[in-house]
Amino acid sequence: MNSDLIIHSVKSLFTRKTRSFLTVLSILIGIMAIFTLISFGLGLSKYVTEISTEMGVDKLVIQPKSFGGISIPEKQMSQDDVDFIANVKGVRDVTGLMIQSAKIQPDEDTKPKYLFLMGFTTEKEEKEIFLELMTVDLYSGRMLKKGDKLKVILGYNYQLPNKIFEKSIRLGEKILVNDVQVEVVGFFESVGNPQDDSNIYMTYEGVEELLGEEQGYEWIMARVEPGEDPKALSEKVFEKLRKFKDQEKGKEDFFVQTFQEQIEMFTNIMRVLNAVLVMIALVSVFVSGINIMNTMYTSVLERTKDIGIMKAIGAKNSDILIIFVAEAGVLGLIGGIAGILVGYGISSLAGFAVAQAGYSFLKPAFPLVLIIGSLLFATITGAGAGMAPAIQASKQEAAESLRYE
Amino acid sequence: MLSDYIVMALRSLGRRKLRSWLTMIGIFIGIAAVVSLISLGEGLSNVIESQFDIIGADVLTITATGNNYGPPGTGVTDPLTTSQLEAIERVKGVEFTVGRIIETGTVEFNNRVDISIIASLPEGERGEHMIDLLNFEVDRGRLLNPGERNKVMVGDNFADSDKFGKPVQSGSRVYIEDQQFEVVGVLKKKGSFVVDNTIIMNDDQMREIFEVDREDLDAIAAQVKKGVSISKTKEDIERVLRKERDVKLGQEDFGVETAQAALSTINSTLFAVKLFVYLIAAISLIVGGIGITNTMYTSVLERTKDIGIMKAIGAKNRTIFTLFFIESGFLGAVGGIIGIVLGVSLAKGLAFVGQATLGSGLINADVSIGLVVGSLFFSFIVGTISGLVPALKAAKLNPVDALRS
């Protein structure tokens, strides 16, 4: 019975090739647009889950309050703060990160760029927190070790020509940081965004050698003991540090977040933007639904006589209804399949282009749910749009329909 | 003659009312989406542009190059100095200069602490010039006089109760970096995130509080004399600064820009985002266009016999073509008119709701005549292009075959 219906609907679609093709094309375009956009949205969510569960699930971040990301130098966190947090029960390891702006040149004759200089620890456990939270790994060369002062590890992009500087920088070369010669001992892997891939990294001692003693920390990162709830601990650390720093409630000059909260804050804007774009693209699916409805009304009109004959030989109203709804559903399904194929191609190409531009964290994802969901959505849109014409067809009087010319 | 065509087109559209309506719905949904998004997008651009209107086109802003992270002049390794300011003032073509320092600091009010931007008001005549340049006006209270100690004026956002739980008013006492200040006035809203969140303080006192060197400056504004070339003056200033700061051509560690130049960078980013959104909205228009093509094909098919008769009694190919062409153009244009009306009301409605719920001036609908005329024209074009192939098909029908069908 069901296969009969499908064969019947495919056959009648073929008899009106141009019209069916155009209708399928319109749903194809709509499905393609939402498929592409959602695949990027899902890719972003996947990225967030990956880094927040694999690297960030057991971590807290303590930062000075700031205005639009700019903190006050005197309000940066101090070594005393780090030591205090290390002693809070439930905290396993703590490390501070210095973030400073630095003047960087490959050599004296090149126009300088002002980029971020990060200072990090050389202690083993603490260094691990830093590497996990920054999601960086050594790409080539060696890690910084105790006693390294005028040695630097560069972000991935420094190796590429015409990216940060015209010429690429190689291992062992000397570059100028704030007019001081430092040796490049390593490169980090790509983080996936141009800002972080342009950072340079030195030891605390190195940063202090360049910028003076007693540099504060822009970030303190802490690892939670296994089994501790990071959220509860973040509140505890906040409260204890407030008392330690002798600040009144509400007058704190710092804040504590779990890493998960922090990464969500950063990606929320992109998710909202993605959701808005999907909504806008949904409009085109709606319009394609209207096209299906139109095609089906025409189809019902053209086959008025057929409907009369079918009814005369005993077809029930529900049979007629199902025939036309199935036809509309098949239109949607075919459009959906084609839309997914084209959408897959576009997403992959766009993902490649975006990665070339340095934003490799924006990668499309194609889980099975998305594919099945898009197919279902296309079919339901088709069948739904075909509902009104099908009802009209099913309600036609057999005698009247037979008389129709 | 043309009116005959139009009457005929209208009649044949009227004969298939349902189909014509569904086809037009496809177009007007697309047009409504594009029109509402464009008017909201233009509204956003206007708000952003108005932030830059604060400073005139004939004012050059000079900053030392930093990492563009935060307010002008921050993250700089080699700041501008007062002697450089004087050198700029000696440049022929410069009317006067204003040098400022800009810092971030803690502000306490109503037992709450927040981080804010604090900018200096220079002493004497330069202070007067700055008030003129930035076109400062007060809503409540009075303007700060150059040289006045222990007094500040604050940006409009301080008058919001969300910032400190209750609004800062003229006469309020605030603590800036733990020193008490009296607020003499609240500045009129500028619509700029930075200016509206800034506190303006006497230059002398600010240097004491933030321990800024007497010589250092974060930004210099230079008013170009009336009738003097701005680009020529810009070059002169660059030359003077190269000498003062001892840097070679092409290696400048400072920038001289008009506000318009800074605006163009922001505009190009915004333009890319807007273009992307419009393109996605335009997809639904393409789908709507496919709907027109489909309807016209069906129409040609249904009227094959009519076309045969018309040709038999002497209608030329061109006549048939024009007939169908007008019909599809009409579908597009009427769909466009309804779409514009809907789109404009949607945009105005969204802007109204957005402003009421978010209180943000960023959501604004700007409906220009160009947009209305443009989208009307565009929808007509979409209609005619979509109808082109079916109309050609109709025109080329062989009269004998057509009559026989």
Image (tube, coloured by chain):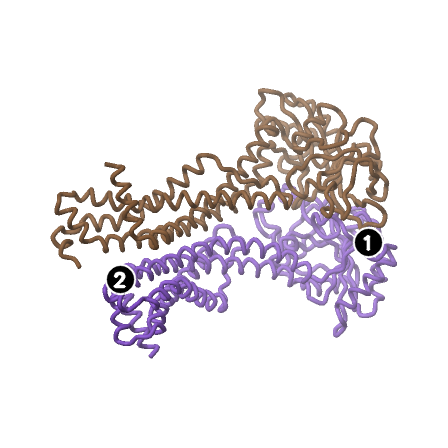
Chain colours: A brown, B purple
Report the side of B242 relative to B300 (left or right).
right
**One can see residue B189 in this view:** no
According to the picture, the residue beneath numbered tag 1 turns out to be: B251
Closest to the observer, B237 or A135:
A135
Outermost residue toward the bottom?
Answer: B1
The kind of residue tagged 2 is Glu
Closest to the observer, A330 or A150:
A330
Q: Quadrant of residue A249?
A: top right
Q: Quadrant of residue B142?
A: bottom right
Residue B204, image x, y percentages = 80, 53
According to the picture, the residue beneath numbered tag 2 turns out to be: B302
Report the mark closest to the observer, 2 or 1.
2
Say which quadrant the N terminus of chain A sits in.
Answer: top left
Q: Which chain hosts label 1?
A: B
Report the side of A400 relative to B6 (left or right).
left
Other residues around mark 2 within 10 Å, as few (<14) / some (14–19) / many (≥20): few
Give the structural element (helix, strand or loop) at label 2.
helix
Residue A332, image x, y percentages = 35, 45
**One can see residue B155 in this view:** yes
What residue lies at 37% left-to-right and 40% top-to-bottom? A376
State which tag comes first along the sequence, 2 or 1.
1
The kind of residue tagged 1 is Gln
How far apart, in angstroms, are the residues tagged by discs 2 and 1?
73 Å
What residue lies at 76% left-to-right and 72% top-to-bottom? B228
Q: Quadrant of residue A368?
A: top left
Q: Is residue A56 above or below residue A114?
A: above
